[in-house]
Structure formats: C-alpha cells, structure tokens
Image (cartoon, rainbow, N blue to C red):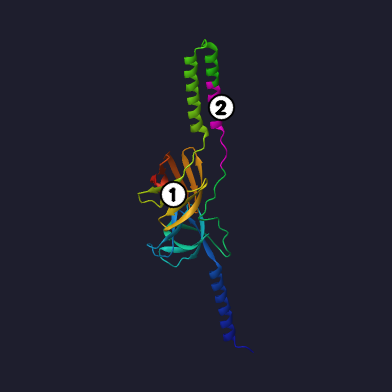
Amino acid sequence: MQNPKIMARIFFLLIALFIFSKHLSAQDLYRVTADKLRVRETSDPKSKIIGFIPQNENVAVLDSTNAKYFKVKVTNGEGWVSKDFLVKIASVTKPVQQKSAVSVEVPKISKDYSNIIFFAVVALVMGTILYFIFKYSNQNKILIGISAIIVLIVIYFCFITFIQKKTVSGTFVSDSETQYQTFDFGTNDSVIVKDTYTDSTFTAKYVIEGDMIKLYDQQNMILLLIRDENTLVGEGFTRGVFTKK
C-alpha cells in the first residue's frame, strides 16, 4: 500500500505543474491608448526605439513583471512599451491572432475624373469662343491671332494644372529635428527614407494626390506637401521643410 503522504505530495505537485504550465502559455491581451506608442529594445526608457504601435491596437503582453514597462509581441519581433498606455482586455491561453501592429498597406486609390471633365469643359468653351471669333471677326488676322494665342495659353495652363501628373525626383533633406531626415525619390513609386529614431533607412511606396505626397512605411503614413519642385513641407509628426540637394 502506497504512503498517503507521498500520494498527496504527488497530487499537489501535479496541480502546481498544471497551474505553472497554464501561466506560461497564457498571454494577457491589452489595448493601446496612446496615439503612437513607442516600442523600445529593452525596458530602459532610454533604450533604442524599434517601432511604434497605433492607437486602439491589441497587443499580447509577454512579461508584465516590470513596474513601468511591459514586454509585448509585435509583428517584427518583441519589444518593451510603457504600461501607462495599455488597458487590459482579457487573458488568452493560445497564441493571439494579431493584426499587423506596425505595418500599413498602401490603399487602392480610386480614380478621380473630375479634373479631366473640368479640362474638357474648359477646352470646349475656349474652342467655342475661338470659333465665334473666326466667324465674326471679319477676317481680322490680328484679332484672330491674339485670340488663338490666349486660348492656347489657357488650355496649356489648365493641362499642366489639372491633367499632367506631378512627379518628384532627387533627395530632399530637412535641417530640423524630425524622425524622417531625408527622402530620396529614385523611382516613380518608391522612396528611400532615413529614420533618425531607429538610425536606419527603409524603402517606402508613395502616391501623389494633387499637391500631396502620401508615403506608406511599416509604421505610419507620412504626408508631404509639394510646395515647388525643390521644396517639400512635412505634415503631422514629420513637420518641417525639406529642400532638394
């Protein structure tokens, strides 16, 4: 007959192992409350920033023993964030199916034909005016010539303003302390960006809508206003003036 004390010890040992294994497999799920929560390499508040998590994103906390910083799981690895900007949602006992915490997809841009329609209307109006000038000018060549030049100039400026696609090229640099220091536009749809926070460079896709450039990197959407061919103006957290080298 087995010793009851030994059996009791084995029973409590199994219970303890079960609770411990559950604790290891469980991950607390938190929601981010900050607008852009910094993810650091270690729990040291002065350590290197390796990414950002947007507001209302759900993250799995891997280590909550630190008094001020929690270790979290993100798509490109693991990092530490301030616990003051996290709100607990639930505890889960299986891996969390997270959305991308530090990635932004380039949305499909719907085509806008309003500029084309406006240009067609202007061209039609100018053509009609020119027709009536030809018809009722009594063959006045000077009047016809001046009218034709004015109509062509108006149509040309409407074309370059509303129809012709804007492009940027070259390297633009800012003298101010911004996260993104340089933008090197080398191709029609991608740009090399210097990130001073992470001391690294990355290639991002971009689109131009009117006078606004929209860049999509792994963390944020970056907005740049085209002031002229040699100057870009940063908006939001990229605020600053970028001049062409």
Q: Residue at x 57, y 33 (%)?
A: 113
* Picture quadrant where residue 81 is located: bottom left
What amino acid is at disc 1?
A: Phe
Q: Quadrant of residue 114?
A: top right
| Rendered-image quadrant of the N terminus | bottom right
Which secondary structure, mark 1? strand
Is 115 covered by the magenta stretch? Answer: yes
Q: Is residue 27 above or below residue 169?
A: below
Residue 85: percent from the left, percent from the top?
43, 56
- Please give the label number shown on residue 183: 1
Q: Residue furthest right?
A: 1
Q: Secondary structure at mark 2?
A: helix
Q: Amino acid at mark 2?
A: Ala
Q: Earlier in the sequence, mark 1 or mark 2?
A: 2
C-beta proximity under 8 Å, tags 1 and 2: no
50 vs 67, nearest the viewer: 50
Q: Give the residue furthest to the top.
A: 138
**Residue at the image position 42 percent from the left and 46 percent from the top:** 236
The picture places residue 49, in percent across and down from the top left corner, at 42, 59
The magenta segment: 109-126
Observer-nearest of 242 and 218:
242
- Distance between the Cα atoms at labels 1 and 2? 36 Å
Nearer the observer, 189 or 180: 189
